[in-house]
Image: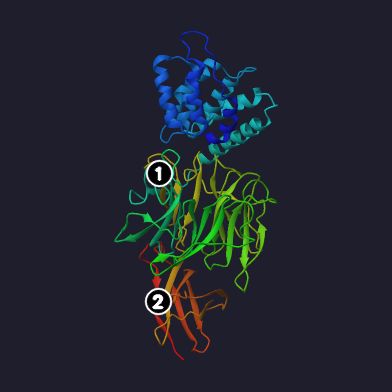
Amino acid sequence: MIKKFLPIFLCLLVSIPAIADKKPRKKDFIQIENLIQIDNFTQANEHIQTLQRKYPDDPYLYLLEGICLLNIDGKIAQAITPLKSAKAHYGLYQRRNEKALQANILLAQAFHLNERFEDALSLLTQLRDTVPTKYKDLHQQLILHINYCNNAIELKKHPVDFRISNLGQAINTEYDEHSPIISGDEGTLLFTSNRRGFSTSSSYTLYPEDIYSSKWREGAWLPSVNAGATINSNNYDATCSLSPDGHTMIIYRNNGQGDLYIAEYDKEKWGSAQKLPKPINSNHEESHGSLSADGNTLLFTSNRPGGLGKKDIYMAQRLPNGTWGKVSLLSNTVNTPLNEESPFLSYDGKTLYFASEGHNSMGGYDIFKSEHDDKGQWQPAVNIGYPINTAGDDLFFIPTPDGQRVYFASDRKGGYGRTDIYIIEFPKTDERSLALVSGFLFTEEGQPAATAEITIHEAVSGTLVGTYKPREQNGKYTLILPTGIRYRMTIRTPGLSTITREIELPYRNNYISRDAAVYLEPMVLKK
């Protein structure tokens, strides 16, 4: 949140000249300001503390201290006190008093990030009415943050019922952990972290992001490990999407502009990441991509020209020959003039979850959902609610097949440091859910039946549910199906006999368990 205003403020940072012996000298501020310019807020604050022991009442030091504390993990609440002191000295706003402008806006941001929304709204409204309109960019930001406050006040009146748990020290550290992706049976978790990985270069304490993985074993996550050199590089590498069987991953790699790559898991390791072709990647940044459960639809974010604003969500369909078709921009029921990020398509393809700074966000990125209607249109986005969404940035919302559990990244209070990965559990209010169904297909020679085609129909109505293929490497197939329905599964393979069998999936609400996936007996396809 604070970084929305920071570029404007840094242009205004001009040291106060020495007036008397009780004031710091101009050169005393130079090092602090330089450190703030390069985002080294911790070291800058250490210099501020040293100067404050000598000049305890200097208002500019209070202002600089507030900037630093707003940008140091776990210190946001402490920023209110020095910013109040700076505001008391500089006043609300007067002509040519840029320090007053900074102190007031930063104090409003501190109120907002500490969920004192009414206090933030009052101060922002006063500023909107007093700051000269010639500051066009600043006025737009003031109006945006006033809207954030109004949205937050309204959303807080109707909190969402859920339980949230930190995934613990096996996954989270004092660094950022974010962008969790999970296999359909919740047995494999991959995520992104800026802890020390393949690259040894760093910006103070943070390293270029790498991808990490963990397995669920005997009721707990194993300690996470680096996912390997085949998908991690010396650049920034980040998780985006994982297929239900856990064997196909979309990743983001920043190699100058930011592109999307695809990697396959085989023989207990990830293969080399391959860059997705045009029209998916372009000469602009593609920051996130999500494959549908059947692998035939890709939703991704890009800042390419022709969108509604900054980063927008686009969609592409895989053609019968395996290539990707034309890219289409999602409508304004999803995209806004602000940034959209981290789309995720539900396993049944009917709900799009994504992050946005627009719509009725309560601050920065919030998580929204949009339903796909019978006419193929995305319905107006709905904020998933407080306190899942907070005053800060909330992104990367990955529901399980039944939607009752969600893997989620947030920088909320009480974590291990910076952004952590959490799991959200909702009340079990509806037994209608989705189930993961998995099995293996082999030939008589014991080889994977790689050319088999699986079609699923509803047994009663005959409605086609979907067409699936087993994996070439091991013959494993993975289906995500609604429960409470009887299905007919047909397996056709060139030159081999056709197999038909029925699958019964009764209503139940415990498919969310990692041990409750439906595993069918391996089938051998005969000549």
Question: In the visual, does 513 lie left or right of 96?
Answer: left
Find numbered disc 2 in the image and state the secondary structure of the residue it sits on: loop
Determine whether 300 is above or below 412 in the image.
Answer: below
Q: x%, y% of residue 193?
A: 43, 49
**511 to the left or right of 154:** left
Residue 98 position, x and y percent, is 60, 21
Q: Is residue 62 left or right of residue 137?
A: left
Q: Residue at x 56, y 32 (%)?
A: 6
> How busy is the neighbourhood of tag 1: few (under 14 within 10 Å), some, or many (20 plus)?
some
Q: Which residue is mark 2?
A: 520
Amino acid type of the residue tagged 2 in the rendering: Leu
| Amino acid, disc 1 | Tyr
Q: Which residue occupies the foreground of this view, 338 or 504?
A: 338
Residue tagged 1? 175
Can you say whether 522 is above or below 181 in the image?
below
Drawn side of residue 46 relative to residue 141, left or right: left
Cβ atoms at labels 2 and 1 below 8 Å apart: no
Examine the rendered structure and indicate whether residue 125 appears above or below residue 450: above
